């Protein structure tokens, strides 16, 4: 089968293979609670090129959408079901013709979502909805999303708007119209969305001065993302004193050590996307997106050697808006 695989000494070089072994030979049995999926579409994330082979497995990719090919006993899924979610990365990446997924990491795909759109949901939207749970976001909450035009940031904007929060996004001014157009704020009832240009020093300074102690949740998708960004020290003062939560999804060595040793500062949280009960979260994400009529913004590519190379070059160079999705057909 076709697959994008990790090669080289450390397994950090990504290559296209036309004849990679099938993840489940005909004579093999699925493990309990597993499904074999015929992949229709797969999306990529920065973690896909950052993980070495001994952690991420040979085949690249986490986010998937496809049809169920084989099922384990005692599951509600049936052969032929259309599903979306995340795969078991150590045994089977998503960027291949076939992949294996745990039953609690996928959900049935709604008819109104194409396979490409559904594949784009996985990691970034699960990260967003779980971050907002940590931040105790609900209707009427004041939410600040840092990095609003990136994959995780835009997903966060869409989810927060659908949750009827009061939303502010920080991104470059040149991306204002893009974020507004994809946010769902035009469709959502009583939507409240404001954008701030981080390249405008005066606008940022005034924003910080006027909004000290205002936000219930700050969702930081930019700090520690690989280009030296660090918003934490200047933005944490915008939290409501004693109740606001600063939730970041990237960070340097110091942040990681604090997380691992349980010494994060008060009102600051750092987390990795949980793999527990993704099925419930995926269903909630679909419900929220349907409520405003928005869908993931993506760039679709064919699944071949040239496109795989181009896709990862774009991802590494941060030259894309939304998600890069490979269509297997």
Image (cartoon, helix red, strand yellow):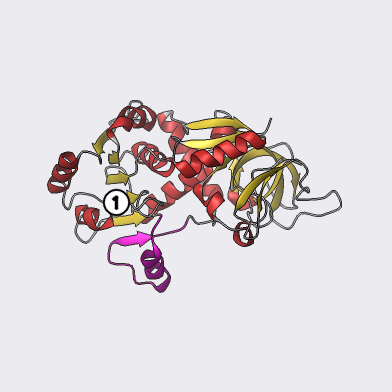
* Magenta stretch holds residue 23: no
**Where, by quadrant of the figure, is residue 170 drawn?**
top left
Horizontal side of residue 59 vs 19, given as left or right: left
Identify the residue at horizontal 37%, vertical 69% (top origin).
258
In front of the other: 139 or 171: 171
The residue stretch that appears in magenta: 250-272
Residue 278 image point, x, y percent: 54, 51
**Where, by quadrant of the figure, is residue 206 drawn?**
top left
In front of the other: 30 or 262: 262
Q: Quadrant of the C terminus?
A: top right
**Is residue 108 depicted above or below 25 in this figure?**
above
**Is residue 207 depicted above or below 247 in this figure?**
above
Residue 28 image point, x, y percent: 83, 54
Q: Which residue was labeled with disc 1?
A: 217
In front of the other: 97 or 244: 97
Identify the residue at horizontal 56%, vertical 30% (top origin).
300
Residue 66 image point, x, y percent: 66, 37
**Where, by quadrant of the figure, is residue 261 drawn?**
bottom left
Question: Does residue 20 show up?
Answer: yes
Q: Given the current orientation, which residue lies at the most extreme front position? A: 9
Horizontal side of residue 308 vs 292, given as left or right: right
* Magenta stretch holds residue 251: yes
Q: Quadrant of the N terminus?
A: top right
In front of the other: 315 or 189: 315
Secondary structure found at label 1? strand
Identify the residue at horizontal 39%, vertical 38% (top origin).
154
């Amino acid at each position: 089968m076709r697959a994008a695989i990790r090669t080289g000494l450390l397994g950090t070089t990504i290559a296209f293979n036309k004849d990679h072994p099938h993840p489940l030979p005909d004579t093999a049995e699925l493990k309990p609670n597993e499904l074999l999926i015929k992949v229709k579409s797969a999306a990529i994330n920065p973690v896909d090129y950052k993980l070495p082979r001994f952690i991420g497995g040979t085949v690249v990719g986490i986010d998937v959408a496809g049809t169920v090919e084989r099922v384990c006993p005692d599951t509600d899924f049936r052969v032929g079901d259309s599903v979306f979610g995340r795969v078991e990365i150590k045994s089977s990446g998503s960027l291949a013709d076939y992949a294996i997924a745990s039953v609690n990491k996928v959900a049935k795909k709604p008819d109104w979502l194409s396979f490409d759109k559904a594949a784009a949901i996985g990691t970034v939207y699960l990260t967003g909805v779980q971050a907002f749970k940590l931040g105790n976001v609900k209707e009427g909450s004041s939410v600040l999303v840092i990095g609003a035009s990136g994959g995780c940031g835009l997903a966060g904007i869409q989810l927060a708007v659908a949750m009827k929060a009061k939303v502010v996004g920080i991104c470059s001014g040149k991306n204002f119209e893009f974020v507004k157009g994809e946010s769902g704020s035009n469709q959502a009832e009583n939507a409240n969305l404001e954008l701030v240009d981080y390249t405008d020093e005066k606008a940022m300074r005034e924003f910080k001065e006027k909004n000290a102690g205002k936000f219930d949740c700050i969702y930081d998708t930019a700090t520690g993302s690989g280009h030296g960004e660090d918003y934490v020290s200047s933005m944490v003062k915008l939290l409501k004193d004693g109740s606001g939560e600063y939730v970041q999804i990237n960070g340097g060595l110091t942040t990681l050590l604090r997380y691992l040793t349980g010494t994060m500062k008060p009102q600051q949280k750092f987390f990795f996307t949980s793999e527990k009960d993704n099925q419930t979260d995926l269903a909630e994400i679909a419900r929220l997106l349907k409520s405003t009529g928005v869908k993931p913004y993506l760039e679709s590519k064919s699944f071949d050697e040239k496109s795989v190379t181009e896709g990862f070059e774009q991802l590494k160079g941060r030259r894309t808006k939304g998600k890069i999705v490979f269509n297997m057909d």
